[in-house]
């Protein structure tokens, strides 16, 4: 329901803007506009929305059977963040059963593979937030504290969000709010401890980047943390993604620095091209025409090209790139190109931007793949 209300608000804003462009009041616009134009405006504003759910009397979105394109049914979709990489999925599954040894082995073997390590710590951190008994057992068994500490720190941030919930501030209770900020403070201390234990490891600095907005770091503090992460891994993918979120004006101020940051990173390495798409996602509520921007289309082409390479198609963030590309292609009017991406994602609806929709992640993912199939 919260997702639908947000969609209705966005559609109403688009209608007001279109009425103003025509020199009409909203009521006059509604009296004169054709049904097909209203449907086109709704779908341009939010292609996941069924027009009939926004304005009673409009026709339903045509049904699309995604299984005809080799995609699983909606009931099979999963938001499990560990599923994209089999080795990580196996370690997380074992941890949830109480067995810490696969996690210890994974983090030890891949200690200097920082990209895989950040993805593993992110997934294992969620498992620790849900039930930390396995992490305590690992510590009691005399495990390597470098690995335990970094999972513990990231797990605390997961716990903070789980205590708060994924609803807007007005739907968050004071108790949830307080629990979130108390746990975020614990996260900061735990990440700093992990950084001291493993001075060469960028992962604790990634955790500090993740919590930057929650801790309300000023620019100097954030830049100091960012320099530490960059010194250890200049192309840290997950770190760049959360840094982009830190710099977002969220509807206030200029978005030029956000796109500049994304474009500089994308120019540095193809693995960071997705950042321009993520910047457009951040900006779309301010200007829905962002998906027509040539910079965004170039970035989408770059992400697709990378996904066509062995490194891009098999790395730990391959499904994250597929998710960003699929979301952007549908919004950019290139939905047919997103069909093979959704087929490759299969049941994996765990990455951003789907993750940002919380309980509605599967619904949004399914709506986008239906839109892609409808365009094919």
Image: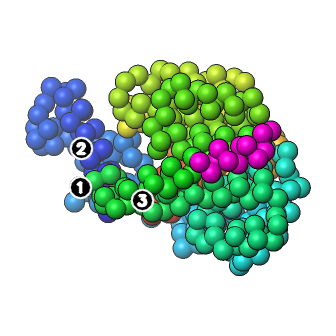
The image quarter in which residue 132 lies: bottom right
Name the main secondary structure of what is drawn in magenta: helix
User: Going 28% across and 53% down the picture, which residue do you hit?
Assistant: 170
User: Going 37% across and 60% down the picture, which residue do you hit?
Assistant: 176
The answer to whether one can see residue 283 in this image is: yes
Give the image's coloring scheme: rainbow
User: Going 41% across and 22% down the picture, which residue do you hit?
Assistant: 254
User: What residue sits right under mark 2 in the picture?
Assistant: 12
The image quarter in which residue 124 lies: bottom right
User: What residue sits right under mark 3 in the picture?
Assistant: 179
**Mark 1 or mark 3, which is nearer to you?**
3
- Locate residue 144 relative to residue 190 in the image: left or right: right
Name the secondary structure under disc 2. Answer: helix
Q: Could you give the CA–CA distance between mark 1 and mark 3, rounded to whole angstroms? A: 39 Å
Name the secondary structure under disc 1. Answer: loop
Q: Could you give the CA–CA distance between mark 2 and mark 1, rounded to whole angstroms? A: 10 Å
**Mark 2 or mark 3, which is nearer to you?**
3
Segment colored magenta: 189-200
Up the image or down, 201 lies above or below 341; here it is: above
Up the image or down, 182 lies above or below 294; here it is: below
Of residues 142 and 2, the one nearer the viewer is 142
Specify the farthest residue to the bottom. Answer: 97
Of residues 321 and 39, the one nearer the viewer is 321
Up the image or down, 22 lies above or below 39; here it is: above
Q: How many marks?
A: 3
The answer to whether one can see residue 279 in this image is: no
Residue 81 pos. (x, y %)? 64, 60
Residue 116 pos. (x, y %)? 78, 50
- Locate residue 253 relative to residue 109 in the image: left or right: left
Specify the farthest residue to the right. Answer: 109
The tag on residue 55 is 1
């Amino acid at each position: 329901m919260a997702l639908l209300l947000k969609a209705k608000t966005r559609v109403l804003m688009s209608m007001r803007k279109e009425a103003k462009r025509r020199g009409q009041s909203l009521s006059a616009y509604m009296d004169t506009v054709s049904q097909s134009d209203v449907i086109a405006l709704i779908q341009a504003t939010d292609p996941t929305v069924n027009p009939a759910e926004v304005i009673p009397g409009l026709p339903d979105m045509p049904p699309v059977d995604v299984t005809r394109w080799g995609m699983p049914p909606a009931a099979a979709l999963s938001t499990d963040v560990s599923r994209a990489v089999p080795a990580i999925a196996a370690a997380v599954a074992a941890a949830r059963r109480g067995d810490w040894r696969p996690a210890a082995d994974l983090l030890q073997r891949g200690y200097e593979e920082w990209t895989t390590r950040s993805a593993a710590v992110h997934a294992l951190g969620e498992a620790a937030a849900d039930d930390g008994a396995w992490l305590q057992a690992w510590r009691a068994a005399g495990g390597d504290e470098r690995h335990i500490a970094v999972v513990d720190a990231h797990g605390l941030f997961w716990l903070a969000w789980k205590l708060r919930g994924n609803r807007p501030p007005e739907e968050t209770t004071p108790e949830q709010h307080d629990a979130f900020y108390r746990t975020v403070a614990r996260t900061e201390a735990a990440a700093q401890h992990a950084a001291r234990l493993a001075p060469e490891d960028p992962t604790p600095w990634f955790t500090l980047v993740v919590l930057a907005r929650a801790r309300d770091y000023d620019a100097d503090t954030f830049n100091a943390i960012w320099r530490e992460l960059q010194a250890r891994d200049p192309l840290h993918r997950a770190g760049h993604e959360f840094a982009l979120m830190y710099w977002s004006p969220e509807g206030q101020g200029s978005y030029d620095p956000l796109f500049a940051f994304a474009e500089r990173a994308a120019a540095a390495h193809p693995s960071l091209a997705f950042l321009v798409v993520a910047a457009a996602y951040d900006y779309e509520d301010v200007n829905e025409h962002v998906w027509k921007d040539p910079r965004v289309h170039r970035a989408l082409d770059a992400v697709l090209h990378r996904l066509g390479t062995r490194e891009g198609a098999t790395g730990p963030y391959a499904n994250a790139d597929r998710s960003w590309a699929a979301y952007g292609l549908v919004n950019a009017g290139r939905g047919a190109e997103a069909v093979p991406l959704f087929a490759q994602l299969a049941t994996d609806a765990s990455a951003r931007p789907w993750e940002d929709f919380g309980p509605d992640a599967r619904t949004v993912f399914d709506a986008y793949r239906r839109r892609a199939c409808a365009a094919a």
